[in-house]
């Protein structure tokens, strides 16, 4: 298969050669016709001038033949040749039937191009009818052929010069095409090797190559961008994989402790028939407590999966948010008997999914209780809800990620080490078109809150 510049050169040469032969053919034909017509015109002029001579004797006719360099013949009315400058007239046959004589007989002047049986060559004939006969001049076509051949030779020389110039400039163009095609080829090889740092700004041999080069660079930029995205995704995937391993480990650990406790207390009761009733009740309470803990963790995981699958349908109703805060406090006080939860809530009516918002209050207050040794303050007003603690706090970097599912801050767990508490809070609030806001400082406590203007009963 030919390269582009080779194909261009060969195609151009074939077109030029074909064009030359067509041009030469037509040029030869038209040049020949032009020369013949020119010869006819010249002979007409000569014969017209000669016909003005009253005495067409042999001496005058010989001079006419010499001066015009043409064959001169004088023919009488009956077609007998009385004089011929190049042949003995007595040996010549009757010329009355010759086409040029017949035309002159009808029109006064006639012409023909034919083969002369007397001289054995092609001649151009012009005949003028005179009162006593016909004056005929003939010019050999050989001289016309020579003239046409000279012209064709000149055309051939010009054509060869044109071919030489074409080869020269084609070589220049081919060199640029070859150079630019190599650059484009190298760029494509680089793309295949995932090397996107290519530059094709110096490809400029033709508009098409420039367009291709620009598109290749554009593709390279897009591939480079996608490669960066892929690298980030791969890195993110590795982080997620690592985090999932940590999550599985955390879930396993969190479930293992209560399960181990249940098994231990149950075995003790089973293996000690005479166990004291008070101690037995205490162990049963422990079993129940750990079972509830497992149930809570399972419910939390189930809720997070349900939220993620977008299977939640809000059941909105009107209720007092202060009463919701109060009922949440009473529920958590049974679990955290020695902790203080301070409510500073106004009576504010809202329209929302009560169960969902109760889950939000439970998660926010329980997190505050777990990671703060002081009291936890819950504030409710017509503008916002806030849960304030004076605990360990969260770093600025962790605040950006803490809403993510299964995220754990430096080994600290949110909602029983599973890491879905704030993910659930954030998702439920977004379902209500609200936004979780977190303000925290490492070692100085945290404030978790959200505005409620959008769910107020008007």
Image (cartoon, rainbow, N blue to C red):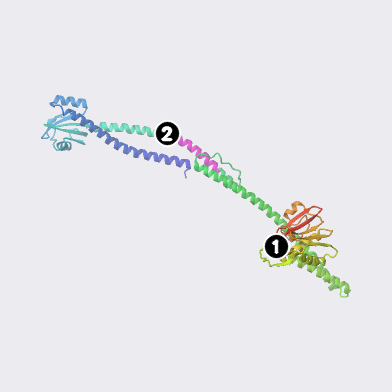
**Left or right: where 235 falls relative to 126:** right
Where 222 falls versus 337 (above or below)?
above
Q: Check residue 455 in the rendering and tell me which mark sits there, or answer none.
A: 1
Q: Check residue 47 in the rendering and tell me which mark sits there, or answer none.
A: none
Q: Is residue 323 visible?
A: yes
User: Residue 105 at x, y = what percent?
Assistant: 14, 36
**Which structural element holds mark 2?**
helix
Which residue reaches farthest front?
458
User: Residue 147 at x, y = what percent?
Assistant: 29, 31
**Left or right: where 356 falls relative to 85:** right
Q: Nearer the viewer, residue 424 or 296?
A: 424
Q: Does 184 lie within the magenta span?
A: yes
**Residue at image x 55%, y 41%?**
183
Q: Is residue 71 visible?
A: no
**Which structural element holds mark 1?**
helix
Q: Nearer the viewer, residue 300 or 118?
A: 300
User: Residue 235 at x, y = what percent?
Assistant: 68, 52
Q: Which residues are magenta?
A: 169-185
Q: Does 227 lie within the magenta span?
A: no
Q: Main secondary structure of the magenta part?
A: helix
User: Residue 273 at x, y = what percent?
Assistant: 86, 75
Looking at the rendering, which quadrant does residue 102 occupy? top left
Q: Earlier in the sequence, mark 1 or mark 2?
A: 2
**Left or right: where 409 falls relative to 77:** right
Q: For the C terminus, which image quadrant?
A: bottom right
Label 2 sits on residue? 164
Looking at the rendering, which quadrant does residue 150 occupy? top left
Q: Residues within 10 Å of mark 1 (few under 14, many from 20)?
A: some
């Amino acid at each position: 298969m030919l390269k582009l510049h080779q194909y261009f050169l060969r195609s151009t040469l074939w077109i030029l050669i074909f064009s030359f032969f067509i041009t030469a053919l037509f040029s030869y034909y038209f040049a020949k016709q032009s020369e013949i017509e020119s010869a006819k015109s010249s002979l007409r002029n000569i014969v017209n001038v000669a016909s003005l001579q009253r005495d067409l004797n042999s001496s005058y006719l010989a001079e006419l033949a010499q001066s015009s360099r043409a064959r001169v013949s004088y023919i009488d009315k009956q077609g007998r040749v009385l004089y011929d400058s190049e042949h003995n007239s007595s040996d010549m046959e009757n010329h009355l039937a010759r086409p040029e004589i017949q035309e002159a007989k009808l029109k006064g002047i006639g012409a023909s191009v034919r083969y002369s049986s007397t001289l054995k060559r092609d001649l151009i004939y012009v005949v003028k009818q005179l009162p006593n006969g016909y004056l005929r001049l003939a010019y050999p076509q050989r001289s016309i052929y020579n003239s046409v051949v000279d012209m064709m030779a000149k055309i051939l020389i010009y054509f060869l010069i044109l071919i030489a110039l074409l080869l020269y400039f084609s070589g220049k163009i081919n060199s640029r095409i070859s150079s630019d095609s190599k650059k484009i080829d190298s760029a494509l090889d680089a793309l295949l090797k995932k090397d996107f740092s290519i530059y094709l700004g110096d490809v400029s041999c033709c508009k098409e190559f420039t367009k291709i080069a620009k598109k290749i660079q554009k593709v390279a930029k897009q591939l480079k961008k996608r490669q960066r995205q892929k690298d980030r995704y791969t890195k993110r995937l590795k982080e997620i994989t690592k985090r999932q391993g940590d999550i599985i480990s955390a879930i396993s650990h969190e479930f293992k402790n209560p399960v181990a406790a249940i098994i231990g207390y149950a075995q003790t009761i089973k293996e000690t028939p005479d166990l004291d009733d008070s101690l037995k009740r205490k162990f049963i309470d422990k079993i129940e407590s750990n079972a509830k803990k497992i149930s809570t963790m399972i419910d939390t995981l189930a809720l997070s999966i349900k939220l993620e699958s977008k299977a939640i349908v809000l059941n909105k109703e009107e209720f007092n948010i202060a009463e919701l805060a109060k009922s949440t406090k009473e529920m958590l006080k049974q679990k955290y008997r020695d902790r203080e939860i301070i409510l500073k809530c106004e009576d504010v009516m809202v329209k929302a999914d009560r169960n969902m918002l109760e889950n939000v209050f439970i998660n926010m207050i329980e997190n505050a209780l777990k990671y703060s040794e002081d009291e936890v303050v819950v504030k409710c007003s017509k503008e916002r809800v806030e849960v304030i603690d004076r605990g360990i706090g969260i770093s600025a970097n962790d605040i950006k990620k803490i809403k993510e599912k299964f995220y754990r801050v430096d080994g600290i767990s949110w909602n029983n080490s599973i890491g879905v508490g704030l993910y659930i809070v954030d998702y439920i609030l977004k379902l209500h078109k609200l936004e979780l806001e977190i303000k925290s400082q490492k070692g100085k406590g945290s404030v978790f809150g959200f505005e409620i203007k959008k769910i107020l009963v008007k």
